[in-house]
Amino acid sequence: MKLFGIYKDKSFIVETVNSEYEAKNVILATGKERFTPKIKGIKEFEGKGVSYCAICDAFFYKNKDVAVLGSGNYAIHEAKQLMPVAKSVVLLTNGDKKIENRDINIDINEKNIKEIRGNNKVEEIDFFDDTTLTVSGIFIAVGTATSTDLAKKIGAIIQNNNIKVDEQMQTSVKGLYACGDCTGGLLQISKAIYEGTKAGLSVINNVKNKV
């Protein structure tokens, strides 16, 4: 089950490819690895036009032209978040096959990307066919969302690209827990199992106390 978003109202709403689920408590345990394409300029412009979270950073690009790099459901989800805010949104597949049966109307560019360029911030994307695309920002959405990506979207505190949790494995968002690699420290199975058990017991106690 691939997750694309978590939102908090009176309870949590978890978005997947085909469904939405409502829950009082959520445990994030999908790891922290994030695939970053080997495109010149991505690392150099992180925080200067290159972003990994549409919900977090969309407001910086109000009425501006932006791009989303990706070809799957995760990329479509990020584009949806940007479309009501940005002036225009284009999906860059970087040569990958575009997603079929998408439920939004969006411009798609399938060209292979050579470089992301700009002075102090992103200004344009260069393709291998010597054409360019002028944008103010590019959102990386290749593959699926990690625990850290999902935590950022809902406002949980992130430190050194790890989700900050307390002794009960609860994040800064009440009812949202995290365990495993996404909390930092030793990237070991034994540590992940321990934290997963602790998070599960915390949720059980939380539910019992509210019954």
Image (cartoon, rainbow, N blue to C red):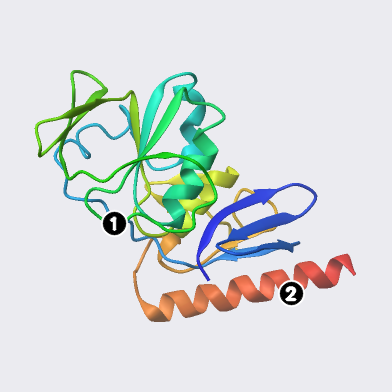
Q: Which residue is mark 2?
A: 204
In the image, residue 211 above or below residue 3: below
Q: Is residue 30 left or right of residue 112?
A: right
Between the residue at mark 2 and the residue at mark 1, the CA separation in whole angstroms equals: 34 Å
In the foreground, 122 or 195: 122
**Mark count:** 2
What is the secondary structure assignment of the residue under circle 1? loop
What is the secondary structure assignment of the residue under circle 2? helix
Q: Which residue is mark 1?
A: 35
The residue lying at 26 percent from left, 51 percent from top is 36
Label 1: how many Cα within 10 Å (few below 14, some 14–19, many 20+) = few
In percent of width and height, residue 85 lies at 54, 26
From this viewpoint, which residue is outermost toward the right?
211
In the foreground, 53 or 112: 112
The residue lying at 33 percent from left, 56 percent from top is 34
In percent of width and height, residue 191 lies at 43, 75
Q: Quadrant of residue 39?
A: top left
In the image, residue 66 above or below residue 195: above
Question: Tags 2 and 1 in contact by the CB under 8 Å rule?
Answer: no
In the foreground, 61 or 185: 61
In the image, residue 154 above or below residue 145: above
Instruction: Say which amino acid is labelled 1.
Output: Phe
In percent of width and height, residue 22 lies at 74, 61
Chain-order first, disc 2 or disc 1: 1
The residue lying at 40 percent from left, 57 percent from top is 99
Instruction: Say which amino acid is labelled 2.
Output: Ile
Q: Looking at the figure, which quarter contains the C terminus?
A: bottom right
The residue lying at 58 percent from left, 42 percent from top is 155
Disc number lying in front (2 or 1): 1
